[in-house]
Image (spheres, rainbow, N blue to C red):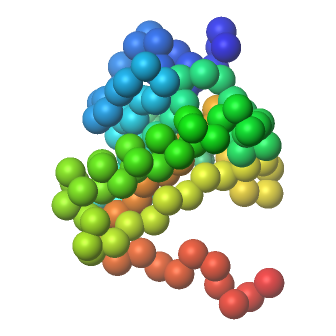
Amino acid sequence: MENCLFCKIARHEIPSTIVYEDEDIIAFNDINPVAPIHILIIPKKHMVSTNDITPDDVDLIGRMFTVIKTLAAEKGISETGYRVITNCGPDSGQEVAHLHFHLIGGRTLGRLVSSQP
Ligand code: AMP
Ligand code: ZN
């Protein structure tokens, strides 16, 4: 998509610190990390969010998770632990409208969901 920030990163039109790339997937360091390891894993094709995933994407999404697993191992956080997050839509606070998984680790992470409603 012409004016999508992450499509531009996938096309190498905007600089980023790429940590993995293949034909369909690219992963790069988050520009504003919330933990020592904070990587974004995205499909190169434009999809807004999980709402756009179809049965045709099963292989792609599965491969994205094998990339996440491999990156976690490379970064040394497989055993210490990590979190994978994707935001979808306004209530989640999704800022970039191109599907991405956050891989976050390297420190103790707080509880994701509080007991408060
Ligand atoms: P989300 O709120 O789930 O849409 O997350 C968007 C993420 O993209 C945020 O964590 C931002 O810090 C990150 N981000 C925004 N612009 C860039 C960029 N040019 N390179 C790397 N990460 C970015
Ligand atoms: Zn895009």
Whether 34 is drawn above or below 19: the answer is below
Whether 105 is drawn above or below 81: the answer is above
Whether 26 is drawn above or below 109: the answer is above
Q: For this view, does 94 lie left or right of residue 71?
A: right
Q: For this view, does 117 lie left or right of residue 13?
A: right
Tell me what residue is drawn at x 41 percent, y 13 percent: 12
Q: Nearer the viewer, residue 68 or 60?
A: 60
Expressed as whole percent of the image width and height from the top left, the position of residue 35 reads 35, 60
Q: For this view, does 3 lie left or right of residue 54?
A: left
Expressed as whole percent of the image width and height from the top left, the position of residue 95 reads 65, 41
Expressed as whole percent of the image width and height from the top left, the position of residue 87 reads 66, 52
Q: For this view, does 112 lie left or right of residue 91?
A: left
**Quarter of the figure that contains the N terminus:** top right
Q: Is residue 97 visible?
A: no
Whether 97 is drawn above or below 89: the answer is above
Tell me what residue is drawn at x 40 percent, y 35 percent: 27
Tell me what residue is drawn at x 42 percent, y 29 percent: 26
Tell me what residue is drawn at x 74 percent, y 88 percent: 116
Q: Nearer the viewer, residue 34 or 2?
A: 2
Q: Is residue 66 visible?
A: yes
Residue 22 sits in which quadrant? top left
Q: Nearer the viewer, residue 115 or 72?
A: 72
**Quarter of the figure that contains the C terminus:** bottom right
Instruction: Tell how many labels.
Output: 0
Expressed as whole percent of the image width and height from the top left, the position of residue 73 reads 24, 56
